[in-house]
Amino acid sequence: MLSPNFNAIGWEGQGLKSLAHKPDREFPYAWQNAVGDGGMLVLGIETSCDETSAAVVENKVWVRSNIVLTQTKLHEPFGGIVPEIASRKQMEFIAPVVQQALSDAGVTWRDLDAIAVTNRPGLIGSLVVGVSFAKAVALAHNLPLIPVNHLEGHVFSVFLRERDEGRGARDKEQMTGNRQDWEFPFLCLLVSGGHTELIWVKDVGDYEVLGRTRDDAAGEAFDKVARALGLGFPGGPAIDKASEGGDPNAIAFPRADLTPSLDFSFAGLKTAVVRYLKGLEDRLKRKQNPTVADIAASFQEAVVDMLLTNLERAAELTDAERVAVVGGVAANRRLRQKLLSLAEKRRWQLALPELKWCTDNAAMIACAASFRIEKGLAQPNLLFDAYAVAEINDACL
Ligand code: KG4
Ligand code: ZN
């Protein structure tokens, strides 16, 4: 039971005995493996960046609905996300997004077993919108509320599945790669706008970070280089597209090698591209004529090479049979293409989530919470904060 120690946090108060939330329903629930048999239903809420997302997930992995509102157009003129705008828009749209997720799933508040919300890491104003909304509805509907680490959510995106209604009762595999039933342990490369990490996922809640970026995240490098190339925002998809038809070997951009560690560094590569662009006028005079496609493809190749080199080394170190690549940058077509051949060569079982599960979504948050509930690792409460900075192993309470 959580009781706030007001003195410890520098507050004074009277009369408040406990802020612990005591919903009717108790963990753990009985688990069933089929869909539509009355198994556990978890509503996920995700507002860690500019997305406003809500999803209903059944029996840990089955996505009944997933709504994602993005604000790309609103932030485009600024060349990046403006946190103040992001959180204000999320405050406007969170309620209808959640309502839509419930109605698409064909459920009401009474059908839900729990609510899961991202409370770390991310833009603090955006996180506060999701967390506050989730606390309010959990209290109003007497439902357990579980805080979820966004990074853990990305890791669990490998488990998501969806019924393919169009093809009758068949399950639709939401993966590229040769994934069969996914199990622990697995090696996970998490590549997003804020993080680049190699994680040895031993079990639910048991993660060993083997390497991480020492400066920019891979997605951040894509965004910054796209801006330098005048390709707009968000940079990852823009470079992915601009690289079409370009020669990935046109320019030999540097690859940081931090051996023996498994860490990454992308700042040097980003600076090399910016310097290259500054020297472009001279090159044009000398009639060397790289196209934007060549520059984008060469930069992208350098990022992909660095990611795959460390992934391969980490797989050797851990003797991994299963490898997953998750997060926004996992949507990159060149990365996916090279990963597929590497997995074949190395005989890895590879999980590469469908594009919609790579970028931020609430289904992965509900999924991570469900696995925690099953393991007895979820601690539902209404007394938790939102945190801008957090590692995957940081406790949330
Ligand atoms: O996981 P995500 O949606 O949000 C974070 O948790 O950060 O990742 C967003 C990042 C952005 O930096 C975006 O440019 C990058 O993922 N991204 C891509 C692609 N699609 C999104 N990077 C490279 N190629 C893509 N196709
Ligand atoms: Zn993310």
Image (cartoon, rainbow, N blue to C red):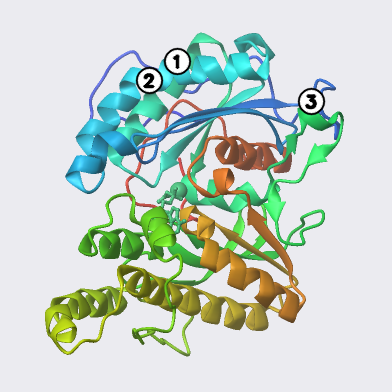
Q: Answer with left or right where residue 64 lies relative to residue 301.
A: right
Whole-percent x, y for residue 157 in the image: 61, 47
Query: Quadrant location of the C terminus?
Result: top left
Residue at disc 3, secondary structure: loop
Confirm or deny contact between disc 3 and disc 1 (CB under 8 A).
no
Q: CA distance from mark 3 to mark 1?
A: 25 Å
Q: Quadrant of residue 19?
A: top left
Which is nearer the N-term, disc 3 or disc 1?
3
Residue at disc 2, secondary structure: helix
Asked if residue 1 can be seen in this view, the reply is no
Figure label count: 3
Foreground mark, 3 or 1?
1
Q: Which mark is residue 351?
A: none
Q: Which mark is residue 93?
A: 2
Q: CA distance from mark 2 to mark 1?
A: 6 Å
Which is nearer the N-term, disc 2 or disc 3?
3
- Seen from the viewer's position, the closer of residues 235 and 144 is 235
Is the residue at mark 2 in contact range of ligand 1, meaning its CB lies under 8 Å from it? no
Q: Which mark is residue 39?
A: 3
Residue at disc 1, secondary structure: helix
What type is the residue that disc 2 sits on?
A: Phe
Residue at x-position 33% and y-position 39%: 72
Residue at x-position 60% and y-position 73%: 338
Residue at x-position 41% and y-position 66%: 243
What type is the residue that disc 3 sits on?
A: Gly
Q: Answer with left or right where residue 142 lies relative to residue 106.
A: left
Whole-percent x, y for residue 202 in the image: 68, 62
What type is the residue that disc 1 sits on?
A: Pro
Label 1 sits on residue: 96
Whole-percent x, y for residue 265 in the image: 36, 76
Confirm or deny contact between disc 2 and disc 1 (CB under 8 A).
yes
Foreground mark, 2 or 3?
2
